[in-house]
């Protein structure tokens, strides 16, 4: 039997000089003591000089760092991708109950007039789920807006009904919500978690001084305080539930004078509770016109990398998406055959981010939900979103290919035919992320 | 074939039976397409209704319309023929089951039940429609099929006991108890009450069943091979039911995979 080294290995060293290995296909992580680094490197360089009687070889083989010579790992990624897109039978719905918002963020693309989902559309969605759930293996619902909790009665009532249908049909279900957190009081939170809404994404644009300017409430000049009070109340009252609240912090250069205190404040309030995860997003130049006008907001690479290490040493988990039990979870629903966005007016879209973009509305709007509870879809438009374009050779040999699967965004890849935009966190910052995992998770040593 | 006057047909329910029979006989004798009057058979004398069905069969009338037309007043032998034809033409099994049982012969009723099981008919529909009209042996088969399909225990407890044999009743009792219900027997009826205080194991079983997981009760250590959606969905329900939090590391490190693992975890969390 002959062997080869996996193409998908990331390596870095921690502060103690130990080697950290990650296989992006199997998502396995191992740590190597300094004394063992040479032998590990040797086994990885010349796997055929060893065999399974060698304990290091067999450990590396077990976790996918060494594979049989006949294995084409890129083919495995392609199989996983196709299985997720065409073979996966989970119904993935993003529901937009309203496009209304109580915030007036400086960077927001949504605008008035505002609409709320009518009872008629709510009933159609419930009828659709009741009528068609047996065709699917389960259901995953994402709530999006506008600000979805301005329509909290709609959200809670629908989740109550969906839970009842799923229990009756014996189907698993799960839900998440992207909210600004302003309306998420303890009562609303409880109603959501008992109905399987267990992942919440809330954005704080830094400390009060910056947040209240960049994400100002339309009438309350201190939205920061209300959001934080909501979060603290949830933290104190709901220890008996598994849930995750991802606090997304958009870190711009404006935050530089406050960042030290803000990190301490975050850690003191939420760092000691694993229900909370801080997702750090450094404002960087991803191209486009807007950033040209706002170059002063960009955090340069060197500074952001310094802060990544500071955060790690504080014990914050930096990026949830970096490690996944299921590689296909991060694939955008727009690229999947069973992924649909239902807008407040019953129109069905593929991409929730550009529902209101007049130039993309035609291709994005793939159908509507009919009064008899069926999805009336334009298959000609739908197939334009599903799958991915031909993969660039440089993608399949990239160490990160299993994690992005060659398609970061179906809108760019399939519709606009743009080159893939690689995530900097994967490509440039993975060493920080590996070290971060070592701090927060204690990666096991190779035996 | 000549076409009947639609206005005249639609008037049939509102005219006297003699006049209705005259219209039907004229249609029969003058080679009209009979399909439009199949829905009005109860308004004609039964020999005329029988002849209309016979002739419609010769005319190759739509079999679904024929199936809906058979009734208590048409000849059982004719109803049997229509039912056979419906099964041979792969008409929706639920439509056949919902329609034919009171009107067909004992032999055909048994065949329909067999056909329904083979074609994975909705078990509640089959139980509701078939049991009084089929043999005890066939009723046993239907009930075993319903248990296999995890039919609502409330339906099973109220509908099936008088029609099945002793050993099937035992199976049924076991299934209903495992589903978290208790049965009270008395001379005339079977009352089903949901247990207020189920044991943690029974509650857990109920959660798994409602999430669509088939448990092998004989082997509670069997790896359930739960996908991530089932996993999180079951954990949500466990937390709702037992007021405990499943610690993060338990599910991020795949520490629990069997029914017994869940039960032990639950016991330890409750003790805490």
Image: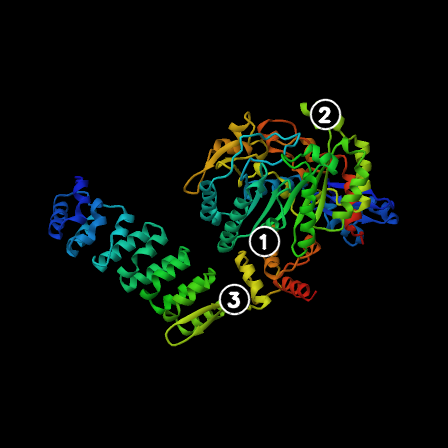
Identify the residue at horizontal 56%, vertical 39% (top origin).
A336
Per the model, the C-alpha gap separating discs 2 and 3 is: 62 Å
Q: Earlier along the polypeptide chain: callout 2 or callout 1?
A: 1
Mark 3 vs mark 1: give the one in front.
Answer: 1
Quarter holding residue B247? bottom right
Q: Is residue A56 left or right of residue B168?
A: right
Q: Are marks 2 and 3 on the same chain?
A: no
Q: Chain of mark 2?
A: A
Is A251 above or below relative to A41?
above
Asked whether the residues under the numbered discs 2 and 3 touch, taking CB atoms below 8 Å apart as contact, a structural biologist would say no
Dot 1, how many residues are within 10 Å of its Cα: few (below 14), some (14-19), or many (20+)? some
Q: Is residue B208 left or right of residue A213?
A: left
Dot 2 corresponds to which residue?
A294
Asked whether the residues under the numbered discs 2 and 1 touch, taking CB atoms below 8 Å apart as contact, a structural biologist would say no
- The secondary structure type at the circle numbered 2 is loop
Q: Is residue A239 left or right of residue B160?
A: right
Dot 3 corresponds to which residue?
B180
The extreme bottom residue here reads B187
Per the model, the C-alpha gap separating discs 2 and 1 is: 42 Å
Identify the residue at horizontal 55%, vertical 69% (top origin).
B197
Per the model, the C-alpha gap separating discs 3 and 1 is: 22 Å
Mark 2 vs mark 3: give the one in front.
Answer: 2
Dot 1 corresponds to which residue?
A194
Is A229 above or below relative to A281?
below
- The secondary structure type at the circle numbered 1 is loop
Which sits in the foreground, A386 or A316?
A: A316
Q: Position of residue B233 (x, y in %)?
A: 59, 53
């Amino acid at each position: 039997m002959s062997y080869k080294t996996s193409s998908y290995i990331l390596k870095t060293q921690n502060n103690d000089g130990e080697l950290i290995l990650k296989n992006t296909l199997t998502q396995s992580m191992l740590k190597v003591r300094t004394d063992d680094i040479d032998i590990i490197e040797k086994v990885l360089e010349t796997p055929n000089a060893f065999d399974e009687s060698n304990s290091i070889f067999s450990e590396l083989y077990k976790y996918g760092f060494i594979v049989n010579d006949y294995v084409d790992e890129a083919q495995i990624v392609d199989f996983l991708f196709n299985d997720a897109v065409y073979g996966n039978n989970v119904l993935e719905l993003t529901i937009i109950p309203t496009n209304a918002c109580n915030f007036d963020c400086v960077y927001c693309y949504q605008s008035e007039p505002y609409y709320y989902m009518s009872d008629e559309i709510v009933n159609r969605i419930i009828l659709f789920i009741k009528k068609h759930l047996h065709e699917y293996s389960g259901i995953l619902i994402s709530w999006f807006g506008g600000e979805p909790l301005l329509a909290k009665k709609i959200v809670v009532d629908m989740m109550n009904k969906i839970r009842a249908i799923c229990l009756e049909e014996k189907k698993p279900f799960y839900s998440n919500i992207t909210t600004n957190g302003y309306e998420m009081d303890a009562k609303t939170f409880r109603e959501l978690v008992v109905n399987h809404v267990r992942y919440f994404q809330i954005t704080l644009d830094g400390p009060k001084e910056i947040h209240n300017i960049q994400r100002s409430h339309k009438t309350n000049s201190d939205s920061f305080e209300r959001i934080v009070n909501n979060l603290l109340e949830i933290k104190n009252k709901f220890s008996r539930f598994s849930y995750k609240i991802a606090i997304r912090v958009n870190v711009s250069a404006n935050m530089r004078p406050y960042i030290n205190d803000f990190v301490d404040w975050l850690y003191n309030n939420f760092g000691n509770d694993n229900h909370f995860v801080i997702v750090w997003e450094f404002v960087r130049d991803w191209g486009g016109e807007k950033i040209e006008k706002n170059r002063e907001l960009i955090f340069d690479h060197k500074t952001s990398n310094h802060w990544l290490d500071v955060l790690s040493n504080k014990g914050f988990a930096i990026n949830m998406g970096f490690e996944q039990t299921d590689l296909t979870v991060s694939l955008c629903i727009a690229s999947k055959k069973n992924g649909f966005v239902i807008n407040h007016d019953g129109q069905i879209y593929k991409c929730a981010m550009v529902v209101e973009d007049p130039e993309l509305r035609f291709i994005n709007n793939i159908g509507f939900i009919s009064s008899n509870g069926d999805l009336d879809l334009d298959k000609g438009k739908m197939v334009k979103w599903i799958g991915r374009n031909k993969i660039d050779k440089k993608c399949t040999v990239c160490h990160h290919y299993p994690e992005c699967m060659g398609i970061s965004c179906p809108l760019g890849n399939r519709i606009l035919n743009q080159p893939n935009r690689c995530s900097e966190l994967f490509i440039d910052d993975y060493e920080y992320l590996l070290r971060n995992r070592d701090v927060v998770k204690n990666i096991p040593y190779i035996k | 074939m000549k076409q009947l006057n639609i206005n005249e047909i639609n008037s049939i329910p509102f005219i006297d039976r003699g006049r209705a029979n005259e219209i039907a006989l004229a249609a029969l004798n003058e080679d009209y397409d009979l399909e439009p009057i199949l829905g009005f058979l109860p308004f004609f004398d039964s020999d005329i209704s029988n002849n209309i069905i016979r002739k419609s069969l010769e005319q190759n009338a739509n079999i679904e319309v024929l199936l809906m037309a058979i009734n208590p007043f048409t000849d059982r032998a004719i109803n049997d023929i229509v039912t056979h034809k419906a099964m041979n033409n792969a008409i929706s099994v639920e439509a056949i089951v919902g329609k034919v049982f009171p009107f067909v012969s004992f032999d055909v009723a048994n065949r329909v039940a067999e056909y329904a099981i083979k074609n994975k008919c909705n078990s509640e529909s089959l139980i509701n429609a078939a049991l009084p009209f089929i043999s005890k042996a066939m009723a046993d088969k239907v009930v075993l099929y319903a248990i296999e399909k995890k039919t609502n225990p409330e339906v099973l407890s109220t509908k099936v006991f008088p029609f099945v044999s002793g050993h099937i009743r035992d199976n049924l009792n076991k299934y209903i108890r495992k589903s978290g219900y208790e049965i009270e027997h008395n001379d005339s009826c079977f009352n089903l009450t949901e247990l207020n205080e189920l044991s943690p194991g029974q509650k857990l079983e109920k959660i798994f069943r409602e999430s669509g997981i088939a448990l092998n009760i004989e082997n509670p250590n069997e790896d359930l091979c739960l996908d991530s959606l089932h996993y999180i969905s079951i954990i949500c329900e466990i937390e709702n039911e037992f007021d405990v939090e499943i610690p993060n590391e338990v599910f991020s490190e795949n520490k629990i995979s069997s029914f017994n693992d869940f039960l032990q975890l639950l016991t330890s969390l409750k003790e805490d």
